[in-house]
Amino acid sequence: MRKKRLFNCVTAAILLINIFLMPAFAVESTEPDDERGFKVIGYYSGDLFNEPVGNLQTDKLTHVIYAFLIPKKDGTLVEFKDDIKLKELVKQSHQDGAKVFIAVGGWSYEGNTLQPVFEEVAASDETRKLLVENICMFVDEYNLDGVELDWEHPYQNTIGDYEKLTVELSRALKLKGKEMTAALNGAWSGTEGPEPSMVLTDKCLESYSFINVMAYDTNNTDHSPIWFTETSIDYWFNRGVDAEDIVIGMPLYARPSWMQYRDLAALNPEYAFVDYAPTTPTESYYNGINTLREKTKIAMNKAGGVMLFDVNEDTNDEYSIVSMIDDVIKRTAHLSKEELNKYITVILDNKELIFSDEEGLGVPFINTDNRAMIPIRKPLEAIGAEVTYDNIGRVVTAVKNDVTVKVPISKNIIYVNGKGIQTDTQAIIKESRTYIPLRAVMEAFDYKTEWHNNSRTVVLSR
């Protein structure tokens, strides 16, 4: 968190002085690793879904959060029944280099909300201390890496007890070299949000290694829009949380049907790419792979990671969200922060049109006229157009059915079946590759063009 920066800098300076004055010998640190890489977190609801642990792509995750460990009002824990599954998950995740946290709480247990349980157990010094001890013993027993506190939700009248539980649990975990996070609400603007977000104290925020923001469930028809991702990131950043410590939640379920993403994709593969499916008896509004890719790119530019709720609801095929996120991360790993902010994604007929340096066909960029310039051959051939280039006349020609488009290089005009159409930018040749003003050319072939500036995404559709 940013509020810890000054203290950390002063501490570091003192530490460096001491190092030069101390005899040379090695001391093994008990502090948890300070990893600043992009987090890819999967909630695994062991008691809700039937997805085997072996099917989880833990090699593509940085963290798995097992849900849920249920507290009691007296500070004890509900008997944990997923002993074998959790041990299997820890073994597999650690082998793949992923950390495993246990989520304590959740919205409800056996049909009863857990908010009253948290309120009562946290109100007493005795029961709160016992709960912290029991959670720490559970962490030790299963060789876990941390805990997520999922009290849904603290309000003005309970934030004091929430803070006590948060601070005491965090302190106890740090003594063991373990981490702590929390499931927190999103917000509808950079400065305003629901009461549970507004009442959260600085002491709470300083206790977390990072926060998981539940940027979903706003309503049924648009329960996790892209704008909510952005405002939620902005809100917690403005509250003093470092960007790299904000992990944005992304749902893998629909509302109001509550269907899982994997079941929607199995029902119709096209449903994997859109955000709505006419399912019965109730419709499904959700985030498809294209929306989740845009959210991932926003998080890569403005935050520190993404969290899938729940990762059990993903597929294990070409429509996998975990695989998509992993692909985006690997594909952009060589880019600087500035280059990443400018990275353009092209979606053609709901499918991503991937450009890479290795392919040698050029990569999209924004020109000085603030227009997206796309290598010509790939998108035009993808829609079935035949592309040729007159090197002498410096004219690109694309033909599909009864439409012929001629694009002169370095001129603010294109010709559609011989008719000149003025353009607001020019086709150019860059590093021996021809780039076109995408909108004008694609509209000639009856494609609509959308530009999503927040994620630097071009969407081409008929």
Image (spheres, rainbow, N blue to C red):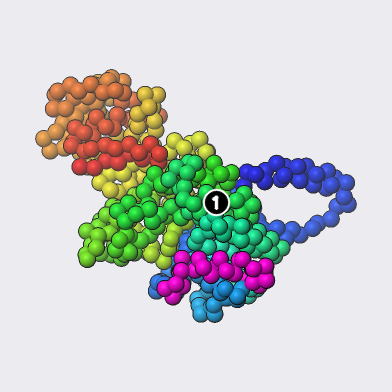
Depth order, front residue of 278/261: 278
| Relative horizontal placement of residue 268, taking residue 124 as reference (left or right) | left
Where residue 260 sits in the image (x, y, percent)? 34, 64
Viewer-side residue, 364 vs 72: 72
Q: How many marks?
A: 1
Q: Quadrant of residue 182?
A: bottom right
Give the vertical position of 276 relative to 82 (above or below): above
Give the left or right position of residue 213, taking residue 240 as reference. Answer: left
In the rendered view, tell whether residue 413 sits above or below residue 174: above
Which quadrant of the figure contains the C terminus? top left
Residue 150 part of the magenta-drawn span: no
Relative image position of residue 360 (x, y in whole percent): 39, 39
In the image: residue 398, left or right of residue 140: left
Q: Is residue 19 left or right of residue 371?
A: right
Majority secondary structure of the magenta segment? helix
Q: Quadrant of residue 52?
A: bottom left
The crowding category of the residue bearing disc 1, from other C-alpha atoms within 10 Å (few below 14, some 14 to 19, many at least 20), is some
Q: Residue at x 32, y 51 (%)?
A: 222
Q: Residue at x 24, y 63 (%)?
A: 282
Q: x, y (%) of residue 347? A: 31, 44
For label 1, the residue is: 199
Residue stretch in magenta: 107-131
**Residue 137, placed above or below residue 12:** below
Residue 301 visible in the displayed image: no
Residue in the picture at 83% in, 43% down: 17
Q: Residue extending furthest left?
A: 402
Q: Amino acid at mark 1?
A: Val
Element class at badge 1? loop
